[in-house]
Amino acid sequence: MPEGGPRDEDLVRRYLSGDRAAFAALVERHERRVYNLALRMTGREEDARDAAQDAFLTVLRKLSSFRGEAAFSTWLHRVTVNACYDLLRKRQRAPLLDRGDDDLPRVEPPPVPDHADLSDLSIDVQRALMQVPEDFRAVMILHDVHDLPQEEVARVVGVPVGTVKSRLHRGRVALAKAMGADRTSPGGSDAGEREGAAGPSEGTMSP
Amino acid sequence: MTHPEELLAGYVDGTLEHEEHAVVDAHLSGCDRCRDEIELARGARAALVALEDAPVPYGLTDPVLAEAGRRFERRKVVVWERLQWAAGLAAAAALVLVVVLNVGGEQDQDVERASTGATGAVGAPEAAEGATLASGLPPFQGLEEQEGVGYDDQGVESIARDTVRVIAGETAPAQNSALFAAPDEGLACIARSGGPVNDPNTTLVRMIRAEYEGTPAYFAVFAEGPGAEQPASTIVVWIAAEGDCRLLSAASLRF
């Protein structure tokens, strides 16, 4: 992802040997990608900001144990996706704790994106994305939005590439159905006529 | 009918090898379901590819850059190496002072978690909950107010040595004339400075408010061990400035 300039791994090495500016350069280089990955994963600006900040803090804390077995960008993507998982989980838990009732599971409605500048299309896609299970969403965002090859997605997510392929396909189908269901809910369009408009077909959502 | 599910994403992306492509084509000619799915997946992919990056909010990376800056200020970390406690106090004369640069990342803790965990009242802090140290440590009693008392590195060393004596059962915990207060603020400060507040292998045994080389500070005394229910083997004294919680010094004493 860096175009020109020192490699990420060289910046890491420089930071670890005492060059403070090298860390700032790493952060600046990746902030856009980290933030946008978090935005697509969480669906809310506020959450994306929190997740991105958590991810960068994790990177800072663990940088000295980064030994370069994986590419820095692979590791950064993984840390970011994990920060998003953590945040989404926290957000699901919070209302339960407030109610002081552990027995009743509560289905959170997908958050409505609050970005005023997003186009209608983008809002539709984001809303539909939030209805796709996280593991599938992550694979789609990494591959289709951030353009990572399937093999790289597999390294980031830590699953075999075959699993990535099948999650990618199932996720896309679920996303299309969620978008179709969204569109047809008030107005109506032909996409809604397909069987089981929302969600994956035949319960095959497991990897 | 089995469906070539692992090939369908690549088919939509146009990245299949010729033979794989032919396999999918052959399947699609007889499978309505997969044909429908391919069409849906194409629409979804097109929508995702068309998504544009949102602008990065102003100040997004300020916290991490500030934290990186704080870490660079932690130059002065004093480590007392290998006091052979069994050899008695004479060994104290053999203490070696080592100044190391840059606290290693491994012993750094999740500051945010630590500060939210540091809300317990006077008494055992929450960090003790997941402790994997063997018991037998003196109970944490709260924040000791030591007004007008100041420590230098030698004084910090004696705090660590006193703690070792207490753990060894040689002396009682210092509770004579100490004034105890709620440790919350001090704990949060220690956590903010990167202290091992939430480390399961570390138990807070004492916290003091006093001066360190003229700066009002919190002194957190931790017992640290290898985990797995084994006894503590190191005392860590973590010192953070009271005002801005910057790390003033951290010292460890193995015994």
Image (cartoon, rainbow, N blue to C red):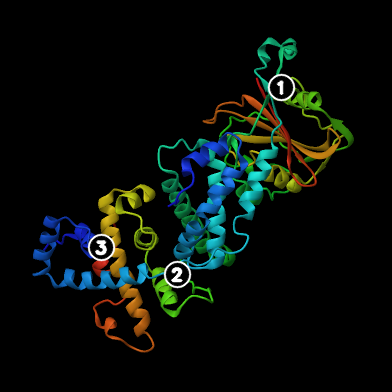
On-image quarter of the C terminus of chain B: top right
Disc on res. B13: 3
Give me the residue at 41% from left, 47% from top: A74
Are labels 1 and 3 on one chain? yes
Residue highlighted by disc 2: A107
Q: Give SS at disc 3.
A: helix
Q: Which of B154 and B52 is in front in this view?
A: B52
Q: Nearer the viewer, residue B173 or B7?
A: B7
On-image quarter of the N terminus of chain B: bottom left
| Residues marked 2 and 1 touching at CB (< 8 Å) | no
Q: Where is residue A187 in the image (x, y as percent from the top left)?
A: 36, 89
Q: Which of B15 and B125 is in front in this view?
A: B15
Amino acid found under the numbered disc labelled 2: Val
For the residues labelled 2 and 1, the Cα–Cα distance comes to 54 Å
Residue B230 seen by the camera: yes
| Residues marked 2 and 3 touching at CB (< 8 Å) | no
Give me the residue at 57% from left, 41% from top: B130
Residue highlighted by disc 1: B169
Are labels 2 and 3 on one chain? no
Q: Give SS at disc 2.
A: loop
Judging from the image, mark 1 belongs to the subunit labelled: B
Quadrant of the image occupied by residue B253: top right
For the residues labelled 2 and 3, the Cα–Cα distance comes to 34 Å
Left-right relation of A38 to B187: left
